[in-house]
Image (cartoon, helix red, strand yellow):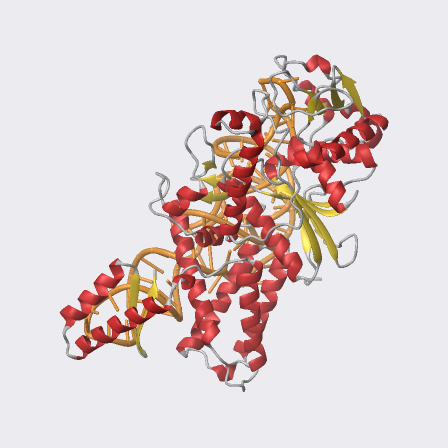
Amino acid sequence: MKNKLTVYNSKARKKEIFEPIHEGRVGMYVCGPTVYSEVHLGNVRTFVSFDIIYRYLLHLGYKVRYVRNITDVGHLTDGGEDKVSARAKLEQLEPMELVQKYSNMFHEMMAIFNTKSPSVEPRATGHLIEQIEMVKDILDNGFAYEQNGSVYFDTLKFNDKYKSYGQLSGRKIDELFSETRDDLKNQDEKHHPSDFAIWMKASDEHIMKWNSPWSVGFPGWHLECSVMSTKYLGKTFDIHGGGNDLKFPHHENEIAQNIGCTGVEPAKYWLHSNMLLMNGKKMSKSDGNTISPYELFTGDSPHVSKGYSPMVVKFFMLQSHYRSTMDLTDQALQAAEKGYSKLMEAAKALDKMQHPGNGNETENNKKLLTTIDNIISDMNDDFNTPKALAGVFELVNFINKLKDGHLKYSDITNEAFEKLKETFNQFVFDIFGLKDEVGSQEDGLFDGMAELLITIRNEARAKKDWATSDLIRDKLLEIGVQLKDGKDGTSWSRI
RNA sequence: GGUCGGUUUGCCGAGUGGCUAGGCGACGGUCUGCAAAACCGUUUACACCAGUUCGAAUCUGGUACCGACCUCCA
């Protein structure tokens, strides 16, 4: 029981045992970014969360097809303008130029955070034909109607048949009706306020528009995900993910479209990640409570005292569960920086450690094996990374004790030690997707110079010339090299 | 106003009807020429008020506060 993966299904509002539709294979769709500006740190959290889910499914041996779309049309601003073309106008670029620019930046950011590329990354504008086909199908099935060149999804009619509109977000169609405000323009085109556009007629000044049986226009925002998930994963697939804020209306409408078109539920499990807060409040550009990933790296922001590396930020994110809100503060990042470096030091130490080959099955041995088992069952429990990470830190404790001789190798069997090594590396690098940022910067010239300075300093120390010794140590620290005088001589590391 | 979620030790954050998560910080120690780093140890909290229970921070009800969403030409 403990070894089975369970996931929290937002639709069922409970944890369920994960059983893929087709044995050994998983289809996963995650709503990607709208590429009209630089990626938001909150988006990063969502995609890092789903990256870890993707990596863990791969680790479990599933063949995963991971589809994450890029929205480049149909997502509108408050003023009704397309977000992409509005920004393109501002930057004096062709809409597709803008899409390319921010897609590239998005991919760069995903690489910086060491996330794996999805299997398919489809764009909305690349699937106009399929979107028009789906609108036709929904019309044919009677769940949509045309009005002045626009096509609206008929939520009342849909709900009469399937009784499920609002199920995901916990909304009732009657309440949606009572909330209607009078100042909504063109509401008279809709039969019911909860109806939504699946095809919109474009005004003359609208740039991004295409021909269709109903008008020259553009697809509704929700349509692309229904179309692309169906195209690449089939009518019903295993996992649909996205940010919590997309539950309503985006995912609710997506479900309605899929069922309205194919007659079946699109996803077996709905997974939603929670929001990233800063200093206890929602990140918002309008009130200045925001920080971009780049500002976070450089420290060029009033919200942080210094820069934090991408892996520190990722480590920070791992410390909370993907379904919980998480609060970004300078203090919390500083703590994460220390924790991350402790983890990497342990990884380096473990890499050099070797078990002599004979050991006994002691209490410590038992404790080690239990710790390892718990890490796995924690991750199986709806991808509980903070708990699994806590377990990994218990492994760090084992590693350090072995290194310092507080724990003898003879108290640990060779088999258990190998299991420790395997589990530690799998979780830290393969599943959490962390990497050692500092180590990769070193080169031979630098190493040689550092060793030379240490030799000179040790000669000074031997003569009790503390002034020279401390000068070397202090100056090296200033340029980011920290010396450590240990029992077995002096070692150094970059900070 | 509606829907959903949250309130955990100095900070960040898991979790469970009885069994000190973890990280950071702080304090003590080991090591050291002194440091730093590292390591070891200590640091026992669960918004408030009722109720259920042998026992609740964990379940139930209420209160307060916080957050997200509330539609696509708003």
What percent of the width, then of the height, locates residue A29? 68, 45
Q: Quadrant of residue A293?
A: top left
User: In the figure, is residue B25 to the left or right of A94?
Assistant: left
Relative to A357, does residue A213 appear above or below in the rendering? above
Q: Answer yes or no: is residue A256 visible.
A: no
Indicate left or right for A97 with A153 as reference: left
Image mark count: 0
Q: Tell me which residue sits at (47%, 35%) in the image.
A: A283
Considering every residue shown, the one lying at the far bottom of the view is: A358
Residue found at x 51% / y 60%: A390
A178 displayed left or right of A478: right
Residue A258's quadrant in the figure?
Answer: top right
In this rendered view, identify the residue nearer to me: A356 or A88.
Answer: A88
Q: Nearer the viewer, residue A97 or A234?
A: A97
Residue A162 at x, y percent in the picture: 82, 32
Image side of residue A47 versus residue A304, left or right = right
Placement of the C terminus of chain A among the 4 image quadrants: bottom left
x, y percent for residue A327: 47, 43
Give me the residue at 32% from left, 79% from top: A488
Asked if residue A144 can be seen in this view, the reply is yes
Identify the image quadrant of the N terminus of chain A: bottom right
Q: Position of residue A432 (x, y in %)?
A: 55, 57
> Which quadrant of the structure image shows residue A167?
top right
